[in-house]
Amino acid sequence: MTPQYIKINGNGSKFYYKDKEMTIFHREDGAAIEYANGSKFWYLNGNLHREDGAAVEWNNGDKSWWLNGERHREDGPAIECSDGYKEWYLNGVELTEKQFNKKTVKEIVLTMDEIAEQLGIDVSKLKIKK
């Protein structure tokens, strides 16, 4: 593991750095910035980065997902605000929700019996229209 340098300011906020000069935020096992108010920021080698959750968590509940310094999330909006506002990003590129869903939809393979079961109807009532 890379050596860490930690600074704790007067109000108890913690800042983790990769370098002795304390210029590159970095932490491999938690948030690199932990503000006393509860906001947290995950950094790796100076870039906002987290693979298992939001890289930015504000104390008001707002969250944003980052990967290697770019806004990015493949399983939902990359920005979620506590007031319900959302934005979608893949590799730093902003998308509409519709564009996002089109790019991230996974192939679904179902049998006719499985489709009928999900619809709650008899399989004999299903027809494939061309």
Image: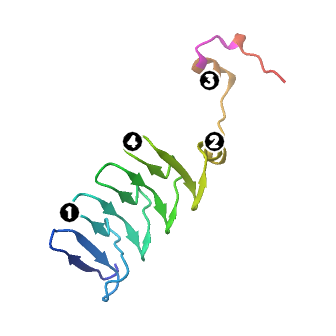
Residue 21 in which image quadrant: bottom left
Which residue is identified by label 4? 83
Which residue is identified by label 1? 36
Which of the two discs, 2 and 1, labels the residue nearer the N terminus? 1
Instruction: Find out whether the residues at labels 4 and 2 contact each other: C-beta distance under 8 Å.
Output: no
Residue type at the position of mark 2: Lys
Q: Nearer the viewer, mark 1 or mark 4?
A: 4
Left or right: 100 as drawn, with respect to 9: right
Describe the element under mark 4 as helix, strand or loop: loop
Describe the element under mark 3 as helix, strand or loop: helix
Left or right: 90 as drawn, with respect to 69: right
Q: Main secondary structure of the magenta part?
A: loop
Q: What's the distance in space between the residues labelled 4 and 2, CA to CA?
A: 21 Å
Residue type at the position of mark 3: Glu
Q: Is residue 122 magenta?
A: yes
Residue type at the position of mark 1: Ala
What residue range appears in magenta? 119-123
Describe the element under mark 2 as helix, strand or loop: helix
Which residue is identified by label 3? 114
Q: Residues within 10 Å of mark 1 (few under 14, many from 20)?
A: some
Q: Residues within 10 Å of mark 4 (few under 14, many from 20)?
A: few
